Amino acid sequence: MRKVFIACAFSSAWAEEFLNLANQILKAAEEMLKSPEAVGLIPPLREAVVAFGTAMRQEKENRHTAVVRQADEAADGLWRGLWGMTRVMTVHPNAVRRAVATSIYGILQKYGNATELFKKDQYGYLYNLIRDLEALGSERLALAYVDEWFVALKKRIVVYKDIENAQNMESGTRRVAGIVLNRRVAAEVALRNFLQRIEAWVELNGKTNYSAFINYANAQLDHLQQTIKSRQTLLDDQEG
């Protein structure tokens, strides 16, 4: 049987990479394939891909969500402390301290309440805030008695980002175990079987009903294969 799909080493892809590929091909199949024989091949693929995606989400949430949430809550608490202390200092009886605190409070107000933002936006906000406060200098922050709040918040933001980065890096690898690994293998088998059966129908009926899907699927397969090759080349160069 003549091959119409580009070969791709599924097992060499990271878990998130393969899941993304499988979801893209599944979606394309649902939208592009209309012949009864092709439509009948989709449910087993959908079941395997959905099961793998569910297992990935559960594994990620179980391992990381609590730790990330605790780090985020700690940063939120320090931000509220900084805001509250600055606001109190704006009515300090010492005119110099009051003036400095007022300028700091103005910076805080410029950005608004960080804790009400989505996490991605919140930490972009906090980095900009830290940059603006650093520009004031440590002496002015100390005059307003917020220097320690500032230092603690700055450190806490770094801790949060380190945890988040570790989460993203681990979820990107393919070293997963148990039910996640089993469902990944099942999804790989389901996708491979699906593509082979489409090839069989193409052999019998020609490409007319399948050409758009084949072109799209091959673009995705080639992209993933090139990603795998590039990563392996980089590793070989580092080892060499």
Image: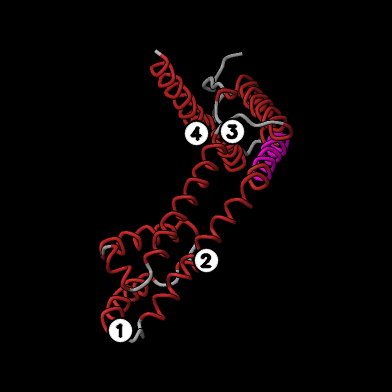
Residue 122 located within the stretch drawn in magenta? no
Q: CA distance from mark 1 to mark 4?
A: 69 Å
Disc 2 target residue: 77
Residues at circles 4 and 2 in contact by the CB criterion of under 8 Å: no
Q: Earlier in the sequence, mark 2 or mark 3?
A: 3
Q: CA distance from mark 4 to mark 3?
A: 21 Å
Instruction: Give the quarter of the image for residue 50.
Output: top right
Query: Which secondary structure, mark 2?
Result: helix
Which residue is drawn at the image coordinates 40% and 57% (left, top)? 124
Callout in the foreground (3, 1): 1
Q: Earlier in the sequence, mark 2 or mark 1?
A: 2
Q: Is any atom of residue 80 visible in this view?
A: yes
Query: Which secondary structure, mark 4?
Result: helix
Image: 18 above or below 163: above
Callout in the foreground (2, 1): 1
Q: Position of residue 179 (x, y in %)?
A: 74, 34
> Residue 94: which disc?
1
Residues shaded magenta? 42-58
Q: Main secondary structure of the magenta part?
A: helix
Q: Position of residue 72 (x, y in %)?
A: 53, 58
Instruction: Give the quarter of the image for residue 32.
Output: top right
Disc 4 target residue: 216
Within 10 Å of disc 1 (Cα), the crowding (few <14, some 14-19, many 20+) is few
Q: CA distance from mark 3 to mark 1?
A: 59 Å
Query: Which secondary structure, mark 1?
Result: loop
Which residue is drawn at the image coordinates 59% and 56% (left, top)? 70
Image: 133 above or below 103: above
Residue 51 located within the stretch drawn in magenta? yes
Disc 3 target residue: 15
Q: Amino acid at mark 1?
A: Asn
Q: Amino acid at mark 2?
A: Gly
